[in-house]
């Protein structure tokens, strides 16, 4: 299913054009208020633009503006599924019935719908929680059920609005793995603040600033040559390229342990370890502790960035507080240890 959208809304001053190829996942990135949710709203039929057109596989769903048909297909008739930060499950139905709701409303027989729902719950790793009500689920479990419910409705396009933003950081990696599987061959648009999501979940990135598209391209191209401020933030991730060996990413001078995103690599495969500068702690002395990766490095640059200080050491970067940078007396040439927990590192094949 390919998607095309082009619209302008004066009230929000957001105007964008976007194409998503069949089976492609596009990440929408941008600062607060840049129009990301508005794009999803227009696609889902929740926002009526002043002018604009939305089509899925050539079927026109929105067509508004001078000389147009005025068509605006209702949200429920679009066969798009929108998943937000909060799971928004029906509180009085158990997880299985929540997921069976979509197939049931398409006219599927109750027993078949429940069997389908069970299959989707298993696909997102919560097959044993079908009898629980939403109030008895953790945030991460509820969000998995919400993903299952969205998929069970057999949408042509999956729209995800910061699906992990409300979750504890410790459960984000496992949901990200579920989403990586789910999105692999689906047509989807995901709004995210997190560059790691863009890199791991999306084929292409579209960056919005102040209601306009300022940059777009294949995720790794935007990474290597960012033109917008947000693209630069994307490029700010630590990326260590290497070979998969002894359950770790072996690079020229580093060995990095992390959580595998998606399929497990085979020995000798080319892999990348990615982690945020904020996840890196900086120490003067050597650090021990098996859950942590430690790298002995020499500081090449200390760069003030608002209330943080970015510490560069060759290709690696760490963000520390101004106070920490002062306490550590960090200057160019300082020998320090960069330390990052394995649970903060995403490892994926390339
Ligand atoms: N219901 C609304 N009515 C009018 N204006 C709105 C409405 N919702 C959002 N806006 C405005 O539209 C613009 C784009 O907002 P939008 O929510 O699409 O941005 P966003 O990039 O998704 O932001 P965030 O990352 O904060 O969720 C903003 O100026 C916002 O104030």
Image: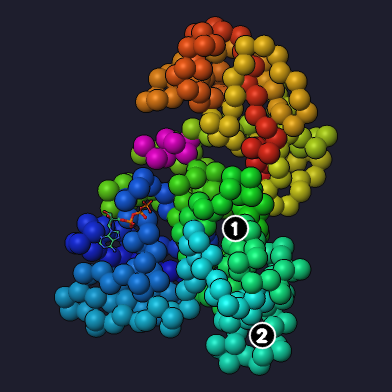
Q: Name the residue under label 2.
A: 113
Q: Position of residue 296 (x, y in %)?
A: 67, 15
Q: Position of residue 252 (x, y in %)?
A: 70, 23
Q: Name the residue under label 1.
A: 139
The earlier-in-sequence mark between 1 and 2 is 2
Give the structural element (helix, strand or loop) at label 2. helix
Placement of the C terminus among the 4 image quadrants: top right
Label 2: few (<14), some (14–19) or many (≥20) C-alpha neighbours in 10 Å:
many
Asked whether residue 158 appears in the rendered view, the answer is no
Q: Which residue lies furthest to the left in this view?
A: 66
286 is higher (above) or lower (below) than 229: above
Q: In which quarter of the image is residue 225?
A: top left
Residue mark closest to the camera, 1 vs 2: 1
Give the structural element (helix, strand or loop) at label 1. helix
Q: Where is residue 130 in the image (x, y as percent from the top left)?
A: 71, 73
Residue at 28% from the left image edge and 72% from the top image edge: 48
238 is higher (above) or lower (below) than 148: above
267 is higher (above) or lower (below) than 142: above
Residue at 30% from the left image edge and 58% from the top image edge: 16
Q: Is residue 86 left or right of residue 145?
A: left
Residue 89 has which mark?
none
Q: Is residue 270 left or right of residue 66?
A: right
- Indicate the quadrant of ligand 1 in the picture: bottom left
Label 1: few (<14), some (14–19) or many (≥20) C-alpha neighbours in 10 Å:
some
Q: In which quarter of the image is residue 337?
A: top right
Q: Position of residue 40 (x, y in %)?
A: 39, 64
Residue stretch in magenta:
229-235
């Amino acid at each position: 299913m390919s998607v095309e959208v082009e619209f302008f809304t004066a009230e929000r001053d957001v105007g964008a054009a976007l194409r998503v190829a069949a089976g492609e996942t596009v990440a929408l990135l941008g600062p607060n208020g840049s129009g990301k949710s508005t794009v999803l709203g227009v696609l889902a039929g929740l926002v009526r633009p002043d002018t604009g057109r939305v089509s899925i596989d050539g079927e026109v769903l929105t067509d508004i503006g001078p000389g147009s048909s005025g068509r605006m297909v209702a949200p429920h008739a679009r066969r798009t599924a929108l998943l937000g930060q909060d799971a928004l499950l029906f509180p009085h139905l158990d997880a299985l019935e929540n997921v069976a709701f979509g197939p049931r409303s398409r006219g599927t027989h109750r027993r078949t719908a429940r069997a389908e729902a069970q299959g989707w719950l298993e696909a997102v790793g919560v097959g044993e929680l079908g009898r629980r009500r939403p109030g008895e689920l953790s945030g991460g479990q509820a969000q998995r059920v919400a993903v299952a419910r969205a998929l069970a409705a057999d949408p042509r396009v999956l729209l995800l609005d910061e699906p992990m933003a409300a979750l504890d950081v410790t459960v984000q990696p496992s949901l990200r793995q579920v989403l990586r599987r789910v999105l692999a061959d689906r047509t989807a648009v995901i709004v995210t603040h997190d560059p790691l999501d863009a890199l791991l979940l999306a084929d292409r990135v579209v960056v919005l600033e102040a209601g306009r598209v300022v940059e777009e391209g294949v995720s790794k191209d935007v990474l290597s040559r960012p033109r917008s401020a947000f693209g630069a933030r994307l490029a700010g991730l630590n990326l260590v390229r290497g070979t998969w060996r002894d359950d770790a990413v072996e690079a020229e001078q580093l060995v990095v342990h992390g959580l595998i995103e998606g399929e497990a690599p085979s020995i000798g495969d080319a892999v990348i370890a990615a982690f945020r500068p904020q996840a890196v702690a900086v120490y003067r002395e050597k650090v021990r502790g098996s859950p942590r990766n430690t790298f002995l490095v020499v500081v090449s640059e200390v760069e003030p960035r608002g209330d943080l200080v970015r510490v560069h050491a060759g290709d690696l970067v760490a963000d520390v507080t101004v106070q920490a940078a002062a306490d550590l007396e960090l200057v160019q040439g300082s020998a320090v240890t960069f330390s990052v927990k394995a649970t903060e590192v995403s490892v994926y094949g390339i």
